[in-house]
Image (cartoon, rainbow, N blue to C red):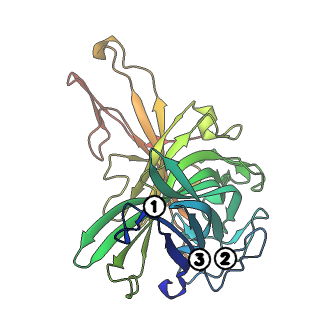
Amino acid sequence: DRSRFNAHHFGFTITKVDPASVTMSGNSATFGLIYYVDPAFDPDASPPKPVAPATSPWEFRVLTLKALFANASVQRFESYAQLTLQQLFGQAVDHMGAEGANPYDALIMTGSLHKQGGVTTYGLEAQGDATFFFDGGVFNKIEVLQAQFSTTGREPANGVTKVSARVDLYGFLDFKTLADGGASFDLFSFGSTDGQALQQGLSFSGLGITTSFEVPNDPTKAAFKSVYAFDASKMAFDATRSTPRTGSLFTSLALKVDSLVTGTTDSTPRDAGYLDVATPLRLPGVRGDWYGLRLQANFGTPGALAGKIGLTSYLLLTWSPPSAGAAARLGLGLRLPGAGQSSSLLSLQGVMKLAVGPIALTQ
């Protein structure tokens, strides 16, 4: 809010005055105080408390920015910002956990200045557990251990500067345990056994909330409204820090975590070459926008006929975000090596073709 951004005082220390001509030469050091506090934020609260967001389901908001200048350099700096996360993977957050719990589903980020090689940069970072719980769907919770803000682009255009930025989240995905008639049929494998234990699940990095806005070059004009988006395309996983459950699909078949896959109605798992896999759970398959956890499975080699080529396949665990009051739609697919798009016909170096019938996963 530019109307609340103030220069409390600002000045120059006049130096190098020539008494003969009463002129000044050289540079003069600046001093001053830049001061901003969001009217809804209590700057005296310790620890800082989040405020009600103005937009949903995501919002990035500067709460305070205070900078004291003396002798042309920053002597003291303080800044807080808030990142509101009311929706993740297309599903509304039900509530936050005890750690940093608040009614706004928000993280408080602390700003800092870094000086290196004569260049000063501004950074924002949140540390400490912030746990987002869900009602239904595939997640017990998503735990955010760290968040980092970075500006990704600035582009002058027609009297404005187009700015884009991104907040990257790091933490754990805690998946629910699926069940077949009361017995565990643990497809998603990673997470806590009680849905509550912290730092349990699939360790992730690079889950992003992006924002873009336009800043008028004329400071008397208000900035344009920010546009937010959820971006899972840069996610990466660390299996060494993850905690698969005993007896799960991941541990039983000695799989490897590969990547996160996303799709829409126009790009289904079958379009990407995945064959449906039947399970006792009778999964209905995804619909609309969907996400998928891709796991690598090594089925050995096809023997001397194909030399040293490996039979590396991919299992895709897919889900669509649940609508209000409905269960998430889940699916399981298998992509075979050498098979064409949506095909169950394998070719071993063009010498022999194998047709594969229905595929089932049992326990």
- The residue that appears at 46% across and 26% down in the rendered structure is 299
Q: Nearer the viewer, residue 231 or 118?
A: 118
Disc on res. 104: 2
Residue type pointed to by label 3: Tyr
> Which mark's residue is nearer the viewer, 3 or 1?
3
**Residue highlighted by disc 1:** 166
Q: CB atoms at circles 2 and 3 under 8 Å apart?
A: no
Residue type pointed to by label 1: Arg
In this view, which residue lies farthest toward the front? 20
Locate residue 331, reporting x and y percent: 49, 54
* Secondary structure found at label 2: loop
**Residue highlighted by disc 3:** 35
Q: Which of the two discs, 2 and 3, labels the residue nearer the N terminus?
A: 3
> Which mark's residue is nearer the viewer, 2 or 3?
3
Residue type pointed to by label 2: Tyr
Locate residue 158, reporting x and y percent: 22, 78
Locate residue 74, reporting x and y percent: 56, 61
Q: For residue 45, which quarter of the picture?
A: bottom right
Q: For residue 287, which quarter of the picture?
A: bottom left
Locate residue 301, reporting x and y percent: 40, 19
Alpha-carbon span between mark 3 and mark 1:
24 Å
Alpha-carbon span between mark 2 and mark 3:
25 Å
Q: CB atoms at circles 2 and 1 under 8 Å apart?
A: no
> Which mark's residue is nearer the viewer, 2 or 1?
1
Quadrant location, the C terminus: top right
- The residue that appears at 66% across and 76% down in the rendered structure is 104
In the displayed structure image, the side of residue 139 where residue 210 appears, left or right: left
Do we see residue 186 in this rendering? no
Q: Which of the two discs, 2 and 1, labels the residue nearer the N terminus?
A: 2
In the image, residue 311 above or below residue 160: above
